[in-house]
Amino acid sequence: MRRYKLEIKGKEFVVDVQTLSANKFRAILGDHAYEVDISSDEDLAGARITPEIIPTRPEDEGVVERPEVSYRPPDPASMRQLPKVPSPALPTKPQLPSDGLRAEIIAPMPGTIQSVEVKVGDEVKHGQPVAILEAMKMKNTLRSPRDGVIAEVLVQPGQSVSYGDVLVKFEEGKA
Amino acid sequence: MTVSFAQLLQGIQNMTPGSLLMIAVGCLLIYLAVVKEYEPMLLLPIGAGAILANLPLSPMIEAEGMFTVLKKAGVDNELFPLLVFIGIGAMTDFGPLLENPRMMLLGAAGQFGIFGTLMLALLLGFDLKEAASIGIIGAIDGPTSIYVSNLLAPHMLGPIAVTAYSYMSLVPIIQPPIMRALTSRKERLIRMPYTSRPISRRIRIIFPIAVFVVVGTLVPMATPLIGTLMLGNLLKESGVVERLTKASSNEIANIVTLFLGLAVGSTMQAATFLKMQTLAILGLGILAFGLDTAAGLLFAKFLNFLSKGRFNPLLGAAGISAFPMAARVVQKMGQEEDFENFLLMHAMGANTAGQIASVVAGGVLLALLGAH
């Protein structure tokens, strides 16, 4: 779990984020929990998306066991009333950007992995077959969306996968 | 002595040019089944049935001959196509359609070609019942074509069944040019991520029963077809009659397919098959198929317009009954343009909708034309 402290227009919010699966998160804000689906996590050009986090050391505040357990954020209703601000530079196809920056390959639909064509350390090119996914009795070749080096293979032949399961991870920065 | 010698040769003496030609047609069907693997499960028995029925003085088609018995037992009374439908229902997963119910619209749109072809067949001089039987070829549904044509125009059963099954196997050849012609590259590139929505067992069990009741009430003529299709699906989804499900989708479907193929093949006799009419049926059949595909594509383009460019029009081609060939064609064409576009699950939804809709269309035709 990660804890984010955000300051929005002078009000402080504490958000605890639990990772449920590759693209599902639970955000806890005060007494409210929100299920969050992340459909895309790419960097918007020039935008800073990493919030500045100042770690608080528990001993500074005199609470050792559970820091800030007494904290009560402001009424979350005030959050909902904020005007919706559209993200300026979201790509038109948020789910599957083809800019080659993705860190992993996910299962595009439920099915069974029939074969994996790459192994850890392999250099792959854009468009190279990575795995064969059998769905609805049809073999579908999953191809690499980018050039890169395979860092991790998370599935084996014969394994059933659901939509969104991570199949293969790329090494960061090795395009 | 001369009498018995002539009796030995009566086979040769009774060979006619027509029966020779029909044997050649039978051989062609077997060739397509064996070499090209065009729907071999049906075209092989149909081809063999055609040869055996056209051999001179063939005992197979005498009053108590095997083919006559099979035809009476299961084709004349519609039993075999309905038993095949139980098997199809037991093999079909309506999950992708339930996840995405709007695909039902594409299934409905895919049936409009039937009526276009019907009108053209009328212009060519077929009577209304014959024209309707030809139009139903457009749905590319073998059992429905057999069911409808046997009720409306039994004399054309052979050519219609052969046409329907041949074109069913030609889906990957006939559809892509139409799909390319009616969609722009930009449209084909529209990505549609899979929308995961778990369908509960309860809904999966209620669905076939609801379809029985709704379709059966609205189109009573479709009850036998939709009823058997959904019965098979109910067996599968209930999860408690695994043996019945297996029997329906394997043993029963396989045995009945053999019987149906032979019986249909045996109806292909020179006197009824070797007519210009048969060529017209072949031509109109492909037109019906093309029109159905085009109607589905155009409707999908309309849906794309309504959704402001987020609906890939290729999916329209899957709104026919040829399952799962049409869905695979859509998936393949989408991937040819963009290997990261996976339309398969959406296409499967439209394809299963096409199965339901073509059965309903068959029922509507029967109701309009007052069969029975």
Image: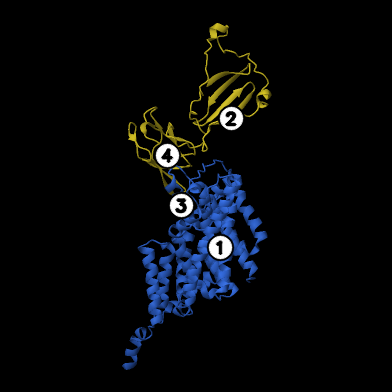
Chain colours: A yellow, B blue
Depth check, mark 1 against mark 2: the one in front is 1
Q: Which amino acid does the dot numbered 2 rest on?
A: Glu
Badges 4 and 3, same chain: no
Q: Are marks 3 and 2 in contact (CB under 8 Å)?
A: no
Q: CA distance from mark 2 to mark 4?
A: 27 Å
Q: CA distance from mark 1 to mark 2?
A: 46 Å
| Residue A65 placement, left or right of A139 | right
Q: Are marks 2 and 4 on the same chain?
A: yes
Q: Amino acid at mark 4?
A: Gln
Q: Secondary structure at mark 2?
A: strand
Q: Is residue A117 above or below residue B251?
A: above
Badge 1: residue crowd in 10 Å (few <14, some 14–19, many ≥20):
many
| Rendered-image quadrant of the C terminus of chain B | bottom right
How far apart marks 3 and 2 lie (CA) works out to 35 Å
Find residue B38 and report its image quarter.
bottom left
The residue lying toward the viewer, choosing from B98 and B340, is B340
Query: What residue appears at the point 57 percent right and 46 percent down from the top-left corner?
Result: B100
Q: Report if the CB atoms under discs 2 and 4 are less than 8 Å apart.
A: no
Q: Quadrant of the N terminus of chain B?
A: bottom left
Point 62% across, 54% down: residue: B211
Q: Earlier in the sequence, mark 1 or mark 3?
A: 1
Q: Residue at x 52, y 76 (%)?
A: B155
**Which residue bears the numbered disc 4?**
A159
Inspect this view and state whether residue B18 appears: yes
Q: Residues within 10 Å of mark 4 (few under 14, many from 20)?
A: few
